[in-house]
Image: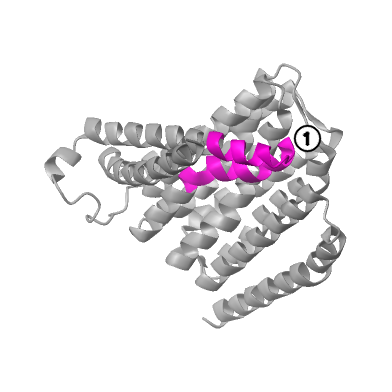
Amino acid sequence: MTLILFLAGLALLIFGADLLVRGASRLSLSLGIAPLVVGLTVVAFGTSAPELAVSVKGALDGQTDIALGNVVGSNILNVLLILGLSALLAPLVVDRQLIRQEVPILIGLSALVGWMAMDLRISFAEGGVLVALLVAYTLLLYFQGRSAPAEEMADELLPAAPGLMAKTPVQLLMVAIGLGMLVLGSQWLVDSATVFATALGVSELVIGLTIVSLGTSMPEVATSVVAALRGEREIAVGNVMGSNIFNLVCVLGISSMVSGTGLTVPPALLAFDLPVMIAVAVALLPVLFTGHRIARWEGGVFLGYYVAYTVYLVLYAQEHDALDEYSLVMRTVVIPLTVITLGVVAVRELRHRRRA
């Protein structure tokens, strides 16, 4: 039954993501809102609903390790796995607004959460600050979206019954049904995957960083991959950026407030996973700066880092003897080589622009 629940949840995620992308794409044209803004708000916030549900439940039940691990793990996964996989399928051309606005906002919020966690607690008041930032960010996007005309999108989306699909109530219904399928599917997936993980004796923090974060991020995975394949690359990238911002300001903010006493930050999370989350956000800047696109090889690098991060978590959970050596190789060889490569690419891009 657990395996059946897992497969049923995965199916709901795939079909729900397809319906959500179709409805949101049409809706953006009907309302005169730029598709990028729809990806950053409706799609991103909607597909992050599972993270909100799981983290709030964890906070209420006193399982703060799962609540925090879910958010941090999801933000790492969203960039490394989702953007990496989407770029491998179809190189992603990135809107300038993401480089000028969303990436700096994501970096700033990631650093803010890291600073809040320095005392090993994200308090009720700090959660309120995060929620206030969510309101301000949403209003900013709304006014920006209304002032910018929507771009033409491929009419290949829902070619059947164009007259019916042009009606706003139908589009809203599609978005609602798609979100419902995503939330239900992700819940089934998380429940079944957590049963498997618990049976192996894995800690709550590792479960939150891996199984739970992967399960709750499946809507983002499915939505961004489907959007990339359909040519809706603004929604594909905007969905990831918006989801990460939403996770930090809304999921963490509300979870901290509903818990009453705030969220206790595990020392292991502060020592490793939070710095990784911040580093992943910072890594987006040079990647997007070089040509305003995420090339296939850059997507491959992201995927490689996600595999390396997952291997580290597995070794850590098992307290494996190879953990120290593995960490040493990552710190002294792999990460420096990646930084050098990105630096060289950035310098070449600057020289190319000056010559042009």
Neighbor class of circle 1 (other Cα within 10 Å; few <14, some 14-19, many 20+) is some
Amino acid at circle 1: Met
Q: In the picture provided, is 266 more to the left or to the right than 51?
A: right
Residue 253, relative to residue 217: is it above or below?
A: above
Using the image as rendered, state which of residue 244 and residue 36 is in the foreground: 244
Q: Residue furthest top?
A: 260
Please report the residue visible at 83 percent of the width from the left and 69 percent of the height from the top: 332
Which structural element holds mark 1? helix
- Give percent across and percent down for residue 47: 47, 39
Residue 65, relative to residue 153: is it above or below?
A: above
Which residue is the site of mark 1? 116
Please report the residue visible at 72 percent of the width from the left and 41 percent of the height from the top: 202
**What residue range appears in magenta?**
191-220
Q: In the picture provided, is 119 more to the left or to the right than 69?
A: right
State whether residue 313 appears in this view: yes
Please report the residue visible at 65 percent of the width from the left and 31 percent of the height from the top: 252
